[in-house]
Amino acid sequence: MMTRISVTVDGSTYSDEVEPRMLLVHYLREVVGKVGTVIGCDTSNCGACTVHLDGVSVKSCNLLAVQADGHEVSTIEGLARDGVLHPMQEAFRACHALQCGYCTPGMIMQSLDVVRENPTPSEEEIRKGLEGNLCRCTGYHNIVRAVEQGAAAMAGSRTADVMAGE
Amino acid sequence: MIPAAFDYLAPTSVEDALAALAEHGDEAKVLGGGQSLLPVLRMRLGDPSVVVDLGRIDALRGITDDGDHLVIGAMTAYVDLIASEAVREHATVLTKAVEEVADPQIRHRGTVGGALVHADPAGDVAAPILALEAQLVITGPGGERTVPASDFFTGLFETAVGDGELLTSIRIPKHTGWGGHYEKFVRVVHQWSIVAVAATVRTEGGTIAEARIGLTNMGLTALRARSVEQALVGCEVSEAAIGAACASAADGTEPPSDLNGSADYRRALAPVLTRRAVLAAAGG
Ligand SMILES: Cc1cc2nc3c(=O)[nH]c(=O)nc-3n(C[C@H](O)[C@H](O)[C@H](O)COP(=O)(O)OP(=O)(O)OC[C@H]3O[C@@H](n4cnc5c(N)ncnc54)[C@H](O)[C@@H]3O)c2cc1C
Ligand code: FES
Ligand code: FES
């Protein structure tokens, strides 16, 4: 039995017939074409597939596409604006917070969740906030630096918006 | 991995969910937050032909104050429980335990009710529920019944919730003024408990007046450490006195042996973690 779902992904609404057993991550990659969201494990441990559902982070391998019916999903592909990286993406680049880059889409989406909850997280809060995201390359050090720098840049751009009267 | 095919129902009321369960019998499986069921389906440890999603039933979500009890809807997500000032104030050991579950992404989706019905002996929600002497409200075709936490966990991954029934809410007697702490022992963050201890205590002028202790992963279900609870009554809040009272924490338990530790290792951990949990709960 196919089920019709309607999901907003990175600002555009999609309506599709899916099998109820289809995982959200497979829907995003194979139906919508958002291949920036990757699959790193079979156990929901690694966090590589992290996206936002109605603004909060979830592991898209541990959710059915039908559960997202009527909801809003944001992926790594929706962050850059007109070819300009999001401040958190830019911070990961500047801090060498990736090597192979496989964990990066999930790391960045979870980092944004950390900053949503707490715009000025301490090193410990960042490490705790990223406990569900594994990186096999970097040793996490530069990732933590990047989140600090990204959070500061985001706070700075909000201040700039306010000063510009936005 | 991809689950086997199933049909999907998303009722918006408890009545409709019960009707779906009655119609499909043991072919049906209830979907809460999905954080344990999705892995089960993906590994094909289960292959229901119908999945009944409770996610669209608003009535199952939320925390209300019912005088001397807090009532927690079964579909209340971990993140909402952690954010509740009422739970932190009147059932602090539960807040502390849920803060230690899994990782932020899973705490956004996983539910208190789903965790209790899943009844993994290494899960972190059962021990504080036992320690708080909560009441579990189960709804079935014949109406509602209430089961005390001490009768709820009946075996490995087994509870008093029968086929065709739902856990609908959890009633927690307010433990206002009681301290609470959850001491979870793991080797790496975001791991299931090797052993953990939920302690809630009431102190009077530097001595313990009452104590309730729940143990995680010391047997097929979460357990109460009743001999420790008795030994703690009248105990001065000091490391030595509490340590002595907690020495029997592993008595009568049959903990598992696995890659994370042998049964003997767990028996050695239990008194140490219990002492730490009680000291922290008593503010010592
Ligand atoms: C990577 C990872 C790490 C984890 N680490 C931990 C950890 O450290 N500590 C811990 O405690 N847990 C951990 N969990 C498990 C997590 O806590 C689950 O969310 C929880 O066990 C199940 O809750 P759920 O709402 O997701 O239920 P689901 O997965 O939807 O359901 C679980 C079971 O309960 C049944 N069910 C659900 N709701 C009801 C209801 N209202 N009435 C009747 N039956 C119902 C379902 O049919 C199913 O059998 C982890 C999970 C993952 C994937
Ligand atoms: S792919 Fe989702 S957590 Fe690893
Ligand atoms: S950069 Fe390779 S896994 Fe993180």
Image (cartoon, grey):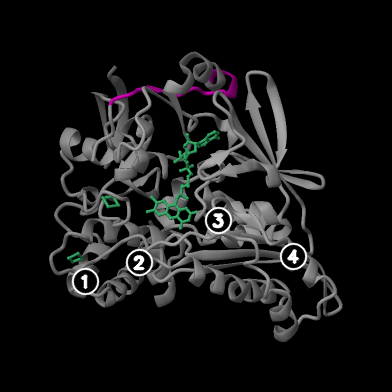
Q: Are marks 2 and 3 on the same chain?
A: no
How far apart are labels 2 and 1 at the CA level?
A: 26 Å
Residue B27: which numbered mark, if any? none
Please tell me which residue is depicted at 46% across the width and 17% down the height of the picture: B24
Identify the residue under disc 3.
B219
Residue labelled 1 has its Cβ within 8 Å of some atom of ligand 3: yes
Q: Chain of mark 1?
A: A
Q: Residues within 10 Å of mark 1 (few under 14, many from 20)?
A: many
Which of labels 3 and 1 is toward the front?
3
Instruction: Tell me where residue B280 appears, x and y as whole percent.
Output: 66, 75
Q: Is residue B19 left or right of residue A98?
A: right
Q: On the image, numbered disc 1 is attached to which residue?
A: A97
- Kindly report which numbered mark, 4 or 2, lies closer to the viewer in this rendering: 4
Whether label 2 touches label 3, CB < 8 Å? no
Q: Is residue A89 left or right of residue B75?
A: left
> Which mark is first along the chain, 4 or 3?
3
Q: Is residue A102 magenta?
A: no
Image quarter where the N terminus of chain A lies is top left
Name the chain letter of the residue that bears numbered label 2: A
Q: Which mark is residue A160?
A: 2
Provide the residue span drawn in magenta: B5-16
- Residue B9: say if magenta: yes
Q: Residues within 10 Å of mark 3 (few under 14, many from 20)?
A: some
Circle 3: element type: loop
* Residue A92 screen position, x and y as percent: 22, 68
Classify mark 4: helix, strand or loop: helix
Depth check, front residue: B34 or B145: B145
The disc placed on residue B227 is 4
Gap in Å between the C-alphas at discs 3 and 1?
42 Å
Nearer the observer, B236 or A100: B236
